[in-house]
Amino acid sequence: MGIKTKIILLLLSATIVTAQPEAETWYFGIGAGIDFTSGKPEMISGPLKTNEGCSIFCDRFGKPMFFTDGQTIWNRDNEIMQNGTGLMGHPSSTQSAVVVEIPSNKNLYYVVTALNVGRKQGLNYSLVDMSLDNGRGAVVKKNINLHDRIHEKITVCATPDYKTYWLITSEYGSNNYLAYKIDSAGINTIPVVSPIGSPKDSLVVNSYGYIKASPNSKYIINAHQNNHKLELSSFDYNSGKIKLIEEIELGEGSLTYGLEFSPDSRIIYVGSIFPESKVYQILHPALIDVDDTEFYELGGWSDEFILGALQLGPDKKLYITNDADSTLGVINYPWLVGEAADYQKRALHTLTGTYTTRGLPNFLTNYFYDPLLCDDYLYDERNEDTSKVNLVQEFPPDGIDIGYAVKWMKGALWSEEMIPISGGFTAEFQVQLSKGGKDEDFTNRGGTGFAFVIQTKSGYELGTGTDGLAYEGLENSFVIEFDQNKDIHDNNGNHLAVLASRGNITTDYSVNGIESTNNIPEIEPDNNLYKCLITYFNRQLKVYVSPESYYLLPQLVIDDFDIENYIDLDKGRAYMGITAATTNIFQETTLKYFRYCTQPIREDNTSSTAIDNITDYNMLISPNPAIDNININLENQYDVQGYKIYNLKGGIVKQESLDYTRLQNLKLDVGSLTNGVYIIKLELGTGVKTGKFIINK
């Protein structure tokens, strides 16, 4: 099995973990739909009937909150929302509608609509309040006009902190792009105007075709059918200004319609609908490392159907609707070049009695951003005949057990081949710790936890020690241990430590330690998912760990760091893996995903969520900023079992066990906290709610 096969498999497993629930159910076409909530696309039927554009917004479980064809809004019960008719979109408009959540208020949503073929009063918005009609929502403002005549296309993207959104369209009969700023103050009705590209006449055909912002919000691509070309532009999400990069010629007779970027924003995809339907992949020097623009025609052409929308899914695949064919095409790996992208023309069939048309739902483009997609991921699974782990072809849905509920048992997961280390790497993984064993005393925490390890001997190694998290005794090894031990000599408590040795490594920090910290989230066998990120670039090592789906700040940073000062690499390469041990508490350690890349990622563009964007707005904290006390108001009554308060480094600064039944309001004393920003995790009988508050005395 070649390395490309291994790459593909991990990406599928990893991206499912980071999917955005807002886009996990789709309704489109004539009664067609897709449900992504299981982690893979399952065809369903839906109540929507539309020729082209539509939009939908889902709750945190991926279930529809409301959806629209641009003229009518339906609620979660598939009933017309209160005051939800008569919107000034059109089901035959290319991108008839898009839903935008209002920053700082999770009950309010804009539904922006676009009329078809450049008709007057073409761009409007309506306001939905989801707190009304028992959570089914109601339209409280309708058809507020933003612009007279536009091309029937709209796209929305966000700034990296998700505090600001930009609604982008193009003006009918001109070459003006219009960018409307949306933030907590509402929609700025005066757009930022950017004249781009060749003049556009008033031919109806120029209204057709999509406009898309890239998932990283840095680029805009726009199709104008009459000109047989695409406009690729840069977008400044701070100012709203758009600048033309190039008009990309597709050749006389190429009528374009659907457009999309790859999840990492490096590759452009175009659907041409005349004279034959075909999919182009475009590599442009402004986006990817090529000298000149390169074109790849994927899958050959077809005269059996007309291609419609191209839309990324929450699984990072690219979906293409085949108009009136009742099928969807799928590009399985849109971040890969040429045939490796794997375009399947008729990959999915709609259910009996439902049909595809030209449209797929229009979403905030950032939902699908993943900057870690590249050509050298790893993927591994345990060999059932041993306690070690080996490379196989399919990621198990329940993860990979690397530490077992067996006394003193140890395990490891390794890359099968040596991988590049010296030039830098990014590794991200998620581990779940849980108690195992029957009728055992768990008060002795032992030397449990897990460790990220780089070594050069082989991809089948296990250390000799158990307290050493299965790495003790390995030769020529570099270790980052996430250790929950509180009572032994190595680092005196729950800690993160970096160790290395060219000989047989030992857990004794005084012998092999490089740097450590106790200021980390508490790692416990509590079934939590601990998400870890390690980056090594430009002589700097950073380590993050979080018990949530976001990172705050790195828990450990080592500057002027060269890994080759501590271990010998084999031509710059080594084996990379995760090790764990159970000692005497019968703890299970399960790896949920693991991925690796030789390119750095910007910290504001990781798969993590910005700290200003983690609050569950069904949990209101006041006053905020606070001095001595905070009040927590929940939207419903819950059984409250406790809370933990974290500082920005992820360390727990205050925690308490509680036993409240059917509580809706909670007052907490936070007077002992110093000035700063804090995260509170409220532990409920049904799950966890997370919020942010500020202390300012």
Image: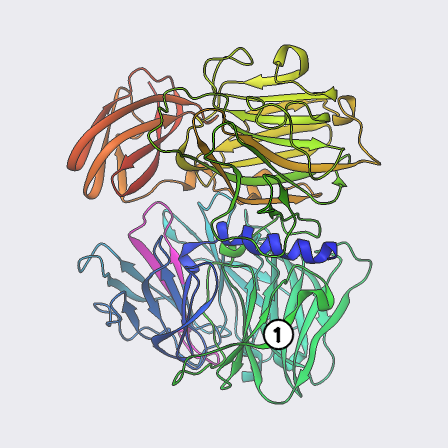
> What's the residue at 34%, 18% (across, down)?
673
Residue located farthest toward the front when viewing the structure as drawn: 385
Q: Residue at x 55, y 29 (%)?
A: 554
Chosen colour scheme: rainbow
Q: Which residue is situated farthest in the right direction here? A: 571
The image quarter containing residue 292 is bottom right
Q: Which residue is mark 1?
A: 344
**Depicted 397 relative to depicted 118: above or below:** above
Q: Is residue 112 magenta?
A: yes
User: Is residue 215 inside the magenta stretch?
Assistant: no
Give x and y (percent) for residue 146.
40, 65
Q: Amino acid at mark 1?
A: Gln
Query: Which structural element holds mark 1?
Result: strand
Q: Which residues are magenta?
A: 99-123
Judging depth in this view, the residue of 346 and 609 nearest the camera is 346
Residue 597: x percent and y percent? 67, 44
Q: Residue at x 84, y 36 (%)?
A: 571
Between 293 and 382, the residue placed more toward the observer is: 382
Q: Is residue 504 above or below residue 424?
A: above
Q: Quadrant of the N terminus?
A: bottom right
